[in-house]
Image (cartoon, helix red, strand yellow):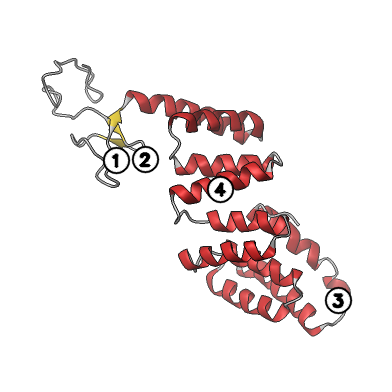
Amino acid sequence: MKCNTCGNKYSDEFDFCPFCGAYPKKFCPKCFKEINDGGDVCSDCGTELLPFEGFKKYHDLKENALEYLDKDNFKKSTEYFERILEDWPQVEEVNFLLAENYAFLGEIDKSLRQYERLAEINPRYMGVYSRIAKIYIEKEEIEKAKEYLQKEHDAYPFENEHYIYSMHICFLEDDFEKANRILDRLFAIGPNEDELLIFKINNDLNLKLVEYDPELADLNERVKAYLEKNFNYSF
């Protein structure tokens, strides 16, 4: 066999390269990282390691998928992500990106199933319950959305995306006092104090039931634009 480190060939009788002492490269099919510590299982997750050659196929497919994604070619990118999951169905990042692609393509039910699949693989994947909740908001199934937002809050109380969606539900239900409490929470954790000030002013106006000042007439549109830009959120 050939050493991945120094390039010299040596007999399979050796567990490591007799020329440079390096162990053969392997990769973890769960963590998807390169490992050359001489072990047979991943030191992080305990998964059995596979030959490094298998990683190249994964790497090439993902590289193509991301290249098309960068070009906003979601259909072609989706094809490559689907091919990856045929061989490596447990890859969390690819499951997430595929769910995102389905959403961009307008295949909401497929997107929902993919997010749910990711939640089965890793119930603590940050943001997955928020994305599921977002879909249920779009489907106008508010109680289901609330259930998933609570799951996200329980797992990551300092993750700000689920507060954004919770605040939107408050607006839908005309519960501006609760929206104000959520805004106060967001001010404490981010994402951006200047932008949150827009939310705060907008909500205060709703809360006090006063008319908009002419200078603030475009606040709602600015809030929507901010959500769409920073949170892939559409009203």
Would you name the residue on which mark 4 appears? 115
- Asked if the residue under mark 2 is in contact with the one under mark 1, i.e. CB atoms within 8 Å, the reply is yes
Left or right for 1, reference 213: left
Separation of marks 1 and 2 at Cα, in angstroms: 7 Å
**Residue 219, above or below 208:** above
Crowd band around label 3 with a 10 angstrom C-alpha radius: few (<14), some (14–19), many (20+): few
Q: Residue at x 56, y 48 (%)?
A: 115
Task: Identify the disc placed on residue 30.
Answer: 2
- Give amino acid for label 1: Thr
Which quarter shows the N terminus?
top left
Earlier residue among tags 3 and 1: 1
Q: Is residue 230 visible?
A: no
Residue 137 in the image: x percent, y percent? Answer: 69, 59
Crowd band around label 1 with a 10 angstrom C-alpha radius: few (<14), some (14–19), many (20+): some
Separation of marks 4 and 1 at Cα, in angstroms: 23 Å
Task: Identify the disc placed on residue 63.
Answer: none
- Asked if the residue under mark 4 is in contact with the one under mark 2, i.e. CB atoms within 8 Å, the reply is no
- Give amino acid for label 4: Tyr
Would you name the residue on which mark 1 appears? 47
- Asked if the residue under mark 3 is in contact with the one under mark 4, i.e. CB atoms within 8 Å, the reply is no
- Asked if the residue under mark 1 is in contact with the one under mark 4, i.e. CB atoms within 8 Å, the reply is no
Q: Nearer the viewer, residue 130 or 181?
A: 130
Would you name the residue on which mark 3 appears? 212
Earlier residue among tags 2 and 4: 2
Between label 4 and label 3, give the one nearer the viewer: 4
Q: Nearer the viewer, residue 24 or 166?
A: 166
